[in-house]
Image: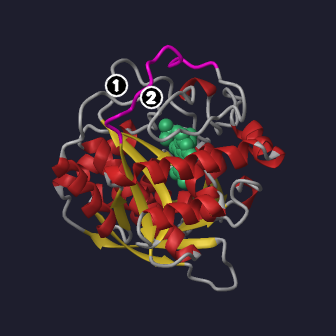
Amino acid sequence: MAAIQYTDRGAAVRVAPAGRLLTGAVLAALDAPSVLNTQPWQWRIDGDRAELRADRRRQLPAIDPDGRLMTLSCGVALHHARVALAADGAQAEVTYLPDPDDPDLLATLRYTGRAERAPHVQRLRRAISVRRTDRRPFADVPVPPDALDRLAAAAAAAGAHLHLVRPQDLTGVAVAAGHAAGVERSDPAYRADLAAWVHSDDGSGTGVPPATTVPSGARTVPIRNFTGGDENASIYSGAEVADRHARYGVVVTGGDEPRDWLAAGEALSAVLLTATADGLATSPMSDLVEIIAAREALRRTLGNVGHPAIVVRVGVAGRGATGPRAPRRGAETAVELVAERVPERP
Ligand SMILES: Cc1cc2nc3c(=O)[nH]c(=O)nc-3n(C[C@H](O)[C@H](O)[C@H](O)COP(=O)(O)O)c2cc1C
């Protein structure tokens, strides 16, 4: 495990049990998915509190000028940390956006005591370690309806609604995705965002490795083309693209403010972990909501059920290996742990 950055308040230091539990949870949350694998978060653990802060240096200027997807990604990390805490038998209280003068402080988690370890939480905790974005076409096997019901329930419990796209609405979703892709591809600033974050491992522990992407072949709903133009070299390039049995869920929120984006992120996390625990494969899709016209078209297609925050593609994984794991930032760059001074002996 990588070292954590310690803020040392004295010569001999210690971390209280609450701090140790929070640290374990925050380290687990470093596996959370994020837009273009930017991992736009910073954690600080002090005593019985963990603070989650948005890291603006990792915001995507063209793709995400309002910080929606940055905040949503932090919401995913927050939910991952809550799952890890619960799996460790710890209870925590969350305060969202606690300081109006400090909008980048997105949430605090305060340890409040021990709790029972529920078996379903252990399944979600295991899912954190094995989940990964699978962009390959899914197998020609339908997703069991009861699994879809569990995803919707998981999103609702996490604070947002998962709208399952009906077959008759798929064309509308595909048109919105095609529109978003066309607009983004023709925008040099968008291509610059991709160029900055789609690369093989450069030691930063961030970014989308080209080997985890797929050619944007013929699909019911087109998937993001990470090259911003030509097809990219991919381990999946020989795959026959069909994806007929993919199901699409749209996380929708009642409002369109930072608090809603955090809720959408927590719901996305709940959906991804529940699907993974059920043996299903997933890939988030945000291109549909990055362009205002596409987001509005998607909203109309769904029947104005709320603000579409992010789309999740769900299905039964295709055959073969899923490809390499996307890297992660070292804990020493993402987590600060404030240690307590041990009182000197008389
Ligand atoms: C808010 C958000 C938006 C994302 N948007 C897309 C997307 O449009 N297309 C895509 O293929 N993957 C998308 N992803 C998946 C990320 O690229 C992926 O999580 C990241 O590269 C890390 O890989 P991993 O999920 O396998 O750990 C998104 C993830 C999040 C959390």
Please name the predominant secondary structure of the magenta segment in the image: loop
Estimate how packed mark 2 is, as few (under 14), some (14 to 19) or many (20 or more) residues with alpha carbons within 10 Å.
many
Q: In terms of sequence position, does the residue under pointer 2 or pointer 1 come before the other?
A: 2
Q: Quadrant of residue 64?
A: bottom right
Some atom of ligand 1 lies within 8 Å of the CB belonging to the residue at label 2: no
Identified at 62% across, 49% down, the residue is: 179
As shown in the figure, which amino acid type bears the numbered disc 1? Gly
Using a 10 Å C-alpha cutoff, classify the residue at mark 1 as few (fewer than 14 neighbours), some (14 to 19) or many (20 or more): some
Which label was assigned to residue 136?
A: 2
Q: In which quarter of the image is residue 160?
A: bottom left
The residue at the point 62 percent across, 29 percent down is: 209
**Dividing the image into 4 quarters, which one contains the C terminus?**
bottom right
| Between 147 and 258, the one nearer to me in the picture | 147
Q: In this view, does 115 lie to the left or right of 311?
A: left
CB under 8 Å between callouts 2 and 1? yes
For residue 152, say whether it is visible: yes
Identified by mark 2, the residue type is: Arg
Which residue sits at x=62%, y=44%?
36
Q: Give the range drawn in magenta.
A: 233-246
The numbered dot on residue 202 is none
Label 2 and label 1: CA atoms lie apart by 7 Å
**Vertical side of 115 occupied by 166: above or below:** above
Write down the residue under mark 1.
318
Residue extending farthest to the right is 188
Question: Residue 217, percent across and down?
Answer: 53, 27
Queried whether the magenta region covers residue 240, the answer comes back as: yes
Image location (x, y in percent) of residue 228: 71, 35
Judge from the rendering whether residue 314 lies leftward or rightward of residue 336; answer left or right.
Answer: left
* Residue 122: % across, % down: 24, 50
The location of residue 62, given as percent across then percent down, is: 76, 54
Local secondary structure at mark 2: loop
